[in-house]
Amino acid sequence: MKNSQMVRVAVPAVPQDADVQRSWRQILTGLDDQAEGAAVALGQEVGHGDVIETAPGALLLVVDEHLTGWGEAFRTGKPYPVMDAAVSLHLVQVDGALKPLWSRRFAKARSAFGTAALGQLRKHLTAWPPASDLQVDVVDPGPGRPNYKPGPCRWCERVLQKDCGVRVGRGEDAQVEHRGECPSELAMPGTYCARCGGSVAPGTAWVVVVREGAGRRETQHSGTCSDHLSFEEYEERQVQQRAAQEEARAAEKAAEAKKAAKRVAAAEKRRAAREAKERAAQEAAEAMRARVEALAVVEESGRQELYDKGLNPYGERMRLVEVTAVLEDGEPAVWWEVAAYGGHLDEEDDRGGRFFLLGDARAEYQSYTYEVEQYRPRPRARTRTRTVPCPPHGAKHCDNCGTTVAVGGWMSASLGLACGTDCYDAMADDRGAHDRQHHTAR
């Protein structure tokens, strides 16, 4: 559990003139007398620029190394960097501020943890002994030391590429880790939360990487554990929801079936009413027919033409007329007449008739359509057995049969003179046989 006395501390960033890879910060908890160099300092390393939470009284060790020149290796002759080191020790105050306790700049980095520096560190560790359960939590990770080569994360073992994550540790012990937290993944439903011990429902928990010791993975509810249902409660609620959905679907189907039954009943009612209306109209029409056939017409009070149309190219037409009249009993009567007229029709044309329902009259009227004139092929020219000579002095002759005598006068065809109807028809659209035989130069 987090210590309620922990305070938030801003770790100093690495100065611009310092080497970011060789500079480091650490919550100092002790010294290892058996180690050499920087390895004597024990504690948890923190990244430069991090915002951490720890207990007041903790000691923060800050080491910044600077490049001062280049040396040459004695055996290989290869150049190597010469570094100095600025070492400082700070005390965490109750308000999170850092109080400088000691600082010194060493001309050579390898001298930074010599006898003089270790004496100062021991003195302040004695004055401010670290708690046995000192906790350090990273609240907001800073830029840290950049990662310059690929490698596995020291916590989750996922490979981080170059320039991804940050480097921790120093020298050969340096490792790489994700910046901030390692990626998490959804936990399997039914597993148990490491914080509350309850089984987790789908989508309510994650498998996270805990950065403690060697690192471990554990299932944790997202947010507050008490805000989530257990797996058993989730399953029970799912059963209830499915039952409620089935009940709602059954109610919906019942309502739809009721609506369908109402629609069928309404349609049947409309059909029955329509049939009753049609029967009543038919009965009224039959009664009107009987009256008109039994009684004489006293007065025809009106004839209204409702429809009129042509039937063919010969002028024949068809019309539908509404007739109103008064019969012998003094009561009015109405009927409809469909009749053909015009053209060469005589009075005995039997098309149409008298109807006592407008629908029947309209159906009869619509059954007649316009008839286009049938194509009649042109009669073949009469075959002649001998050549007919042209009369002398340019006498008139029929361009089809060649005769020079026309009873009743000549008819003018499209390309010459015709002596009769047959010749005229034969020449109406083409030159006559005589004309083709004797006057081809035209």
Image (spheres, rainbow, N blue to C red):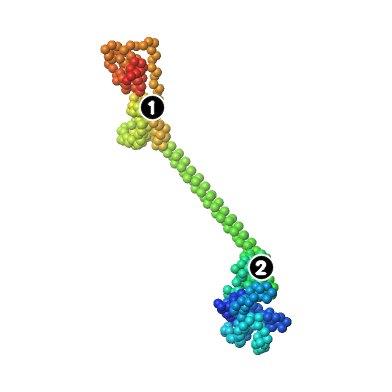
**Residue type (three-letter) at the residue carrying disc 2:** Pro
Which residue lies under the disc numbered 2? 152
User: What's the residue at 65%, 85% (across, down)?
Assistant: 117
Q: Is residue 80 left or right of residue 400?
A: right
Q: Is residue 361 left or right of residue 407?
A: right
Mark sitting on residue 67: none
The quadrant the C terminus occupies is top left
Which residue lies under the disc numbered 1? 373
Vertically, is 359 above or below 422?
Answer: below
Q: Which residue is at the far left?
A: 393
Residue 199 picture location, percent across and down = 67, 68
Residue 29 picture location, percent across and down = 67, 82
Which residue is more in the foreground, 438 or 288? 438
**Residue type (three-letter) at the residue carrying disc 1:** Glu
Q: Nearer the viewer, mark 1 or mark 2?
A: 2
Which residue is more in the foreground, 112 or 339? 112
